[in-house]
Image: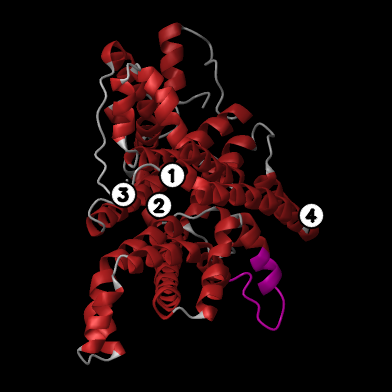
Amino acid sequence: GPAGYVSKLYMSITGAASAPWNIYSPGGVVLVLSIYQFPVVFITVSGALGRIDTSLEEAARMSGASPFKTLLDITLPLITPAIVAGGLLAFVGCISNFGIPALLGFRARFFVLTTKIYSALSIPDMPIAAAMSVILAFVSGLALVLQRRLEREQHRYAVIAGKSVRPQTMSLGAARIPLLVMVTTVALFAGVVPIASMVLTSFIKYWGAPLALKSMTLDHYKYVLRIPIGARAFRNSLFLAVGAATITMTAGALVSYMCIRVKLAVARVLDFLGTIPYAVPHTMIAIAMILAWSRPPVVLYGTIWVLLAAYLVTYMPFSIRTTNATLQQVHVSLEEAARVSGARWSDTMRDIVLPLIKPGLAAGWVLVFMPAFRELTVSVLLWSQGAETLGVVIYNMQDAGYTQIAAALSTVVLLIIFIGNALVRRLSQGEIGF
């Protein structure tokens, strides 16, 4: 920001009165959203690069093509679907994001659909909020339809299958050092500097204090662990995250088993209905919960249960997709052999299926728990007194100007997420996580 650590460093070096950038602007919102969605594109494109048959690139090099020519004519066309698909997924994530445009855009009076919906609900003006939610859902759904169509047409870009693919390293030559500097700089300013600044701010006595040992304190951590709203938010987030992860993984496992193994028609319908929320922005899910549960005979709006209901809808697609992938890795012949040996269905599930899919289910459970634990977009629209979540408390503290307290609470949440990620990587043997 204008008074951030990087801005102060720039002003101290150059002697300028202010930094030439302002994070509280449309450009700042775009920059932070780009950093936030970068892992989506990176994971999508890196997976495609890992599946390329390197013999095609080797053939081009042996024919006299330069590395740059090979990149343009062979590599880029093969990974184009992955680049476009990753971009579409990032677009959906950006257009449905609330926290970043709210924290950085409100001060610059730069509004997006999600923040306008929030403002409409604050009035409250439910018809306007619902109308804008439908527009948001239409735009997001259109992008996801295009992404799914790209997935179906990826066979046009298929390379030789049926043999292992070993990625081959390429010599960068004279460009090695400049590219290393560029990648290191981007990683430093996109990941390391923001997190380090947040942790450092959580220890500073007051905003603007000199960076010296005498300016450090643990009082902010003591405060967030001691105040009633902090403890209540932690309990609420823990209850919601554990409840959502447990219920969605249990339901997802049952639906996946009936769909993949039993092949029931009703299971396919449930699988389809369970994955629809993936194409629906979280803001629209919150609006739907308000409309569905704010009138008799069952009124959940204004309680923590409406948050749990919204979390279940939001994260059900994650559980179904995870359990589908896990079950597909267990060959049906193992269950057939157990049945031929006289085992009952319950015995087969207990002794064969569950032990084999347990690591995948545990990894999926943690993958639902982590985003649910720090969720903001749904919670900020549905929370009520006594039903605050960590995301809501952090947002409200930052918005009210309690930057150090918000940074301390954010650091605690970040530590929990890192522990959860380490657990996921251990359970999935490094295949899932960062």
Q: Determine contact: label 3, label 1, CB under 8 Å.
A: no
Question: First in sequence: mark 3 or mark 2?
Answer: 2
Q: Determine contact: label 3, label 2, CB under 8 Å.
A: no
Q: Quadrant of the C terminus?
A: top left
From the viewer's perspective, tell me whether residue 119 is left or right of residue 62.
Answer: right
Residue 246 visible = yes
Instruction: Indicate which label's residue lies in the foreground, 2 or 4.
Output: 4
Circle 1 residue: 405
What is the CA distance from the residue labelled 3 to the residue labelled 2?
A: 20 Å
Circle 3 residue: 418
The answer to whether residue 406 is magenta is no
Instruction: Indicate which label's residue lies in the foreground, 3 or 1.
Output: 3
What is the CA distance from the residue labelled 1 to the residue labelled 4?
A: 34 Å
Question: First in sequence: mark 2 or mark 1?
Answer: 2
Farthest residue in the front direction? 63
- Residue range (magenta): 288-303
Circle 4 residue: 128
Seen at 23% across and 74% down, the residue is 355
